Image (spheres, rainbow, N blue to C red):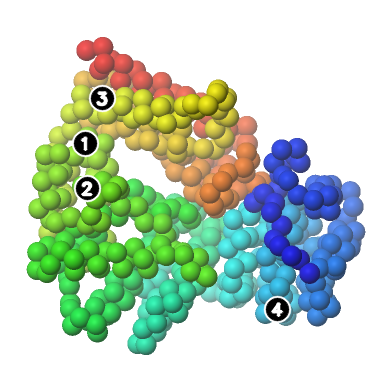
Amino acid sequence: MLQKKLHIPLNLPLTLNDEIEVNEAITNLIKSIQNCNKIGAKSTFIMYEDFFSKKTSKYIKNNLNFFLKNIIPIIFQSRHKKEGLYQLLRLVDNIVFNFSYIDALKTNMFIYKNLSKVLSFSGHITNVVSKDVKLLEILQPDYGFRLNGNKTFYKNSFEKIGTSNFNEEVLLDTLRRTHRLLKFQILFALINNDIDVKRAATEFSLLAEATIDFSLQVINKKNLIEHNLVCKDFSIIAYGRFGTNSMTANSDVDLVFVYGGKFQKNIYIGIFKQLIKILSTKTTEGYIYEVDTKLKPSGKFGPVACTYENFQKYHEIESFAWEKIALKKARVINDGTFSKKVKNLIDKLMAIPISDSDITEEIHKMRIKKNENESIPNGFKKKSPANWFETKYVGGGQRDLEFLMYFYRNKTDLIPRYEIDKNKLFCKKMENVFFKTDQIVNICFFDKKQSHLPNDAINILIKEVNVKDLGSLKSMIIQGKIEIFKLLNQILESKLIK
C-alpha cells in the first residue's frame, strides 16, 4: 500500500535536474512519460499497472486497471499527452484509497474525454477534481451549461444547504464542498472553451459575492436564534480584484468592514469575525478564501472593523495617496440602506484630488522598502530572475502599471502632452495582457510556481492575447514590463528632480 503521497511538482518538469526530488521508481516513470511517443499507449498502461499494482488491494487494482486501460488511449489522442499522463499519475496517487471515487471512474466511461482535458491542462485543476467525486458530474457530456453571468445561479446553489439544525462543522464542510463544485464548473467551462478569460473572472467574482451573501445569512440567523438580534447597519467593501470583478481562480478577498452605531461595537466586530471564520477557517474540506483586511484604516494590526465616521475621516484626512487610488477600484458588496450610505460616501471620497507629489514620494518609499526586505544579511545570494509570466510582484508589473495608468488618466504635468495618448494605449494593452496572464497562471498553480506553464494553458493565453506563438507572448510580456518600469521611472525622476 502507498505509505505517503508522491511529492512531485505540480506540473510536468521540463528536466529532472533540480526541480524534482523523488525515488528512482518515480524518476523512471516520469522519464518514460516524457518519452511516451516512443513506447506507445499499451506499454504506458503496463507501466502504470505495474507501478500501482504493488501498492493497492486486489479490489482497487481491478477497478483502477479498468480505468487506466481505457483513459490512457484517450490521453494519447490529445495534443499534449505528456502533461495528461503526468497528471494521471498525480490523480491516481490522490484517489488510490478512495473506493467510491475509483468505482465512479470505472462506471462512468463517458466522462473520460472531458477528464482527459482536465488532466492535460494543469496540476492545480487536477488537484481540485481529485478532492470530490461529485465533481465528475460536471464532466458528463450531457451536463447542462449553467453559468449565466448572474449571481442568482450561485445563490440558488447555496440556498440548498440546510441551516435549520445549526452544526458549525457540518455547515462549514458543506459550504466548502458546494463552493468547490461551483468553482470547478467555472474552471472546466474555461478549459473547455465554453467561456473566455474575462467571463471566467466575472464568474469567480459573482461566486465570491454569493458566498459572502450566504455566509451573512448564516450569521444573521445564528444571531437571531442565540441573541434575538437583527443587525443591518454595516457594510462590506471589496477592494482589489474582487472590487473590480476580475478575480482569479485563487484570489483572496480584500475586505473592509464599516459599521453604524445602533449596537455596541462588539456586536459588529463579532459579525465580521464570524464572516472571516466561515470563509477562511481550514477544515477537512479545506478553506474557501483567504481574507485580507489590511486596507482598513487601522492597518494590519488594528480592529477588524471601523465606524462610518472613522472611515470617512481617515480617507478625507489621513489616508495615503496609494490608498486613495485603491479606493477608486473598491465597491460595496452587500445590500441595505446603510450600504447605500457607504456607497455614496465612497463616490464622494473618490472625487478627492490626489497629489502628484505625494504619490511619487510614496512609490519611491515602497521601492526602497522592497529592496530592504529583499536584502540577505548573512552573505550574498544572487536572486533568481522572475518567471516571464510573473506580472504581480515584479518591477514593471501590475502595481507599477496601476500607478502609471493613474498618471496618464489624470493628465499630470509630469508627462509631456504628446506622449500621453500613445502611452495610454500601450498601458491599456498591457493591462489586458497582464490580466489574462494572471488568470491562466492561477489555474496552473496554487502558490509556489514552477518555471514554465503547461502547453494547453499557453495555447489559451496565446489565443486570448492574440499573438503568434509562445516566443511572441514571452517577448510581449518581458518587453512590456521593461517599458512600464522605464516610463514610471521617468515620471518619478522628473518629480524628484523638481
Badge nearest the viewer, 2 or 1: 2
For label 2, the residue is 298
Q: Nearer the viewer, mark 2 or mark 4?
A: 2
Residue that numbered label 4 is attached to? 99
Quarter of the image where the C terminus is located: top left
Q: Earlier in the sequence, mark 3 or mark 4?
A: 4
Residue hosting label 1 = 320
Q: Earlier in the sequence, mark 2 or mark 4?
A: 4
User: Given the image, on which type of amino acid does mark 4 rest?
Assistant: Phe
x and y percentages locating residue 484 in the rendered image: 41, 26
Q: Quadrant of residue 430?
A: top left
Residue 152: x %, y % from top left: 35, 72
Query: Alpha-carbon distance for marks 2 and 1?
Result: 13 Å
Q: Which mark is residue 361?
A: 3
Q: Residues within 10 Å of mark 2 (few under 14, many from 20)?
A: some
Up the image or down, 254 lies above or below 472; here it is below
Instruction: Give neighbour class at mark 1: few <14, some 14-19, many 20+ (Cα, 10 Å).
Output: some
Give the secondary structure at mark 1: loop
Q: Amino acid at mark 3?
A: Glu
Residue type of the residue flagged with mark 2: Ser
